[in-house]
Image: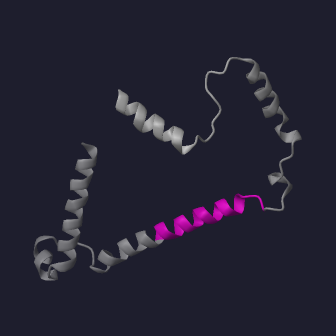
Amino acid sequence: MYAFTGWVASAAVFTCWLAWTWAPGAYFAAKLPLLPDRYWALAVPAWCTTAFACTSLLYIAVNLMATAPLDSFNVITSADGREGIISVRRRSRRRRRIVPDFRDIDIVTANRLMYVAGAAD
């Protein structure tokens, strides 16, 4: 419901904007004397578009600046750094496996599971 209402409202605002920009100035001056200058009909969308583009580029630039360089010691991982993960995996092997490890299966098995088993049901 909210999406439809927003769509109708944005279509109505766009229609009013088109009428304001394309209708002669004397048509609205007699009925609505407090309308802003027509300069703002193009200035506001241009400012909003420019602000959106600059904000997007600034967001990307800040994230790239926050990333560690490739020759930094923060991006180097050794076997000692992953020792905790390996020991947890060794302990989990002792328990009963409920979920199998994630791995690729060959295409023959995938086709058999998807198409042949589905046809028998």
Please identify the quarter of the rendering in which residue 93 is found: top right
Percent from the top left, x then y, of residue 111?
47, 41
Q: Which residues are magenta?
A: 51-69
Position of 42 relative to 104 (above/below): below
Q: Is residue 61 left or right of residue 43?
A: right
Quadrant, the N terminus = top left
Q: Name the residue located 83 percent from the left edge and 52 percent from the top edge.
A: 76
Query: Does 57 lie within the magenta span?
Result: yes
The answer to whether residue 102 is magenta is no
Q: Main secondary structure of the magenta part?
A: helix
Residue 90 percent across, percent down from the top left: 79, 26
**Closest to the observer: 50 or 36?**
50
State which quadrant residue 73 falls in. Answer: bottom right
Residue 34 seen by the camera: no
Residue 108 location in percent, x, y?
Answer: 52, 42
Number of marks = 0
Quadrant including the C terminus: top left
Q: Residue at x 60, y 63 (%)?
A: 60
In the picture provided, is 4 more to the left or to the right than 104?
left
* Residue 27 on image: x %, y %: 11, 78
37 or 108: which is nearer to us?
108
